Image (cartoon, rainbow, N blue to C red):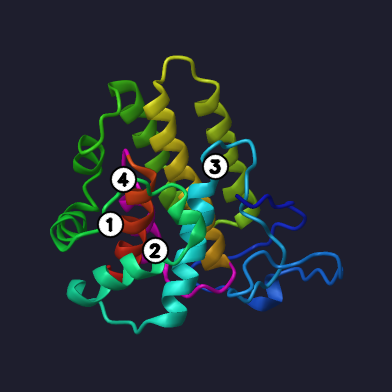
């Protein structure tokens, strides 16, 4: 798992991400941890205090690899096998995918059909009632991030993560699912703010699709949804 230093948090908007609004940092010691993305600044989405930060980091890696290597076809018959190939070729993903057989078309179709229904997405997990309440609280925050400066988005998400981490009433699974989802949100929103070009609908759907008991499944379903949803 890579650790980043948050040195610059830039202002960006999903509707119009103008390079003139982004502060550039030319410090030769700063290295882009994801060279496949043309970073407009060094605004890092990482939060080392989130134990599941690696999930969002992996999301960013596999999304970058997918869009570089495959066409924009949204057909599940095309996307699902290419998602499995992309993730299988990622060494980080392989460290969390023991026992995971990969994404299949049936599960993928279910996610596409239900990704906008938070209750259904949460009910396929085994989170407690309290965990589902906290997840719902987080998802309700997403629309507020749509046209918000990334610095504010980052602060809001990491503050929420701190609250979840310190909540003794939540189960370990609650925290895993919630913190994996918040990590995914940070990285996917940062990707878009740095010129990812996915758009808000795909970004939000990718976040929603990552709600899963299993981290490996969270990565594959999020990636698939980010590609398929229009």
In this rendered view, identify the residue nearer to me: 29 or 216.
Answer: 216
Query: Is residue 157 rendered magenta in the image?
Result: no
Q: Residue furthest left?
A: 106
Which residue bears the numbered disc 3? 157
Q: Which numbered disc covers residue 102?
A: 1
Q: From the viewer's perspective, is the residue at label 4 or at label 1 nearer?
A: 4
Secondary structure under tag 2 reads helix
CA gap between label 2 and label 3 equals: 29 Å
CA gap between label 3 and label 4 equals: 31 Å
N-terminal-most mark, 2 or 1: 2
N-terminal-most mark, 3 or 4: 4
Q: From the viewer's perspective, is the residue at label 2 or at label 3 nearer?
A: 2
Which residue bears the numbered disc 4? 99
The total of numbered circles placed on residues is 4
Secondary structure under tag 3 reads helix
N-terminal-most mark, 4 or 2: 2
Q: From the viewer's perspective, is the residue at label 3 or at label 4 nearer?
A: 4
Residue 55 position within the rendered picture, expressed as x and y whole percent measured from the top left: 48, 49
Q: Tell me the crowding category of disc 3: few under 14, some 14 to 19, or many 20 or more residues within 10 angstroms, Cα based.
A: many
Q: Which numbered disc covers residue 54?
A: none
């Amino acid at each position: 798992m890579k650790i980043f230093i948050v040195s610059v948090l830039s202002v960006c908007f999903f509707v119009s991400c103008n390079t003139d609004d982004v502060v550039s940092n030319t410090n030769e010691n700063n290295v882009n941890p994801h060279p496949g993305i043309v970073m407009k600044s060094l605004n890092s989405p990482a939060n080392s205090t989130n134990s599941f930060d690696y999930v969002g980091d992996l999301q960013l890696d596999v999304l970058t690899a997918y869009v570089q290597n495959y066409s924009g076809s949204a057909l599940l018959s095309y996307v699902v096998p290419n998602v499995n190939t992309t993730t299988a070729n990622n060494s980080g993903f392989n460290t969390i995918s023991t026992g995971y057989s990969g994404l299949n078309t049936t599960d993928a179709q279910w996610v596409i059909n239900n990704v906008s229904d938070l209750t259904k997405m949460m009910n396929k997990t085994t989170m407690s009632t309290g965990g589902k309440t906290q997840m719902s609280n987080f998802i309700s925050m997403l629309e507020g991030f749509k046209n918000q400066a990334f610095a504010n988005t980052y602060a809001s998400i990491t503050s929420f993560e701190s609250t979840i981490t310190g909540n003794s009433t939540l189960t370990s699974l609650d925290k895993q699912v919630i913190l994996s989802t918040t990590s995914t949100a940070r990285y996917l929103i940062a990707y878009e703010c740095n010129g990812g070009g996915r758009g808000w609908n795909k970004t939000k759907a990718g976040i929603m699709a990552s709600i899963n008991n299993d981290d490996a499944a969270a990565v594959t379903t999020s990636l698939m949804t980010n590609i398929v949803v229009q």
